[in-house]
Amino acid sequence: MADANDLTGGRTRRQFLQALGAAVGGVAVSGAGAAGFGSQLPPGQRSGATVIPGSYAFYRVLTTERLLPWPGNPGRLNPVADMTGVVLMAGVTPRLFMHVTLAASAIPAGVPSDPAPNALLLATMDYSQRPSIAGLKIVAYEGQSLDANNISGAAPELLPVRVDRIGTGDTNFNGLYATTITSQDLNDSVSINSAPGVYLYDLATDRWTQKARFGDVVGEGIEYGGIFGDVALADDDSVLFTAGTTEPVAGYGGAQALMLAP
């Protein structure tokens, strides 16, 4: 039996909000909030409780393989040939990180085009009128080499860092992006420039910061191995990630660890 002082009538919070939404002809959203049409604030901003209409409108903001002008760069064509389904909202900013396959017109000179390289793109949304992409930037792409102008925290002898695969990664409240960059080099010996690692991207500086890399010393003579897994980015910009290490474990090549890089 529900407590007489229980305003939810003994229902779960979700059931209570659903009933409230039905009563007022809308849906009550708490916590993440909802950016209304006509607002410059992106969806996901921490705006408290909001009521949005009970019906939904969907807007196409980007279509693959359409010969449309590049958003924010009308002199070029749409750079997106395919999307992998990975889209990450960049905190409270009106930006989205997207994993895509580049269209032929967007592949940088000298980069192999068969198969077309995958890339990390940063889209800037415009919510002031009909939602649309105001700008689109290629952050990194397979086949790219990151030198001292693109990356910090890496020893000079380890530069440039070769980008062969960009992991799914994570974003945080500040709009930064953390991911793994790995090599698809299948040779018996891998160039040190192809060594996998964990990296943090900041649009404000348009640079990557190396947080961890194969061969870095973890402590007591233990080093990171060649495997980095999932990455989570906290709002204080620290990076939590899984990694293989050279710590000896009976019956295994090394130990797996959950690491935090401040």
Image (cartoon, helix red, strand yellow):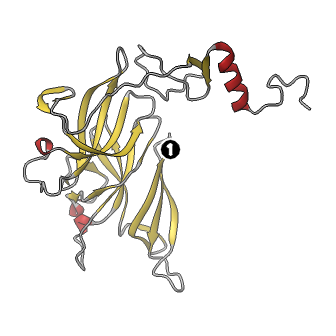
- The quarter of the image holding the N terminus is top right
Given residues 203 and 78, the one toward you in this image is 78
- Residue 206 vs 143, above or below: the answer is above
Given residues 65 and 170, the one toward you in this image is 65
Given residues 172 and 160, the one toward you in this image is 172
Residue 196 in view here: yes
Please state which amino acid type lies under the numbered disc 1.
Ala
- Residue visible at 17% across and 44% down in the picture: 103
- Residue visible at 75% across and 33% down in the picture: 12
| Residue 233, percent from left and from top | 47, 46
**Displayed quadrant of residue 145:** bottom left
Residue 262 in view here: no
| Residue 45, percent from left and from top | 50, 26
- Residue visible at 12% across and 45% down in the picture: 104
Q: Which residue is mark 1?
A: 234
| Residue 255, percent from left and from top | 50, 74
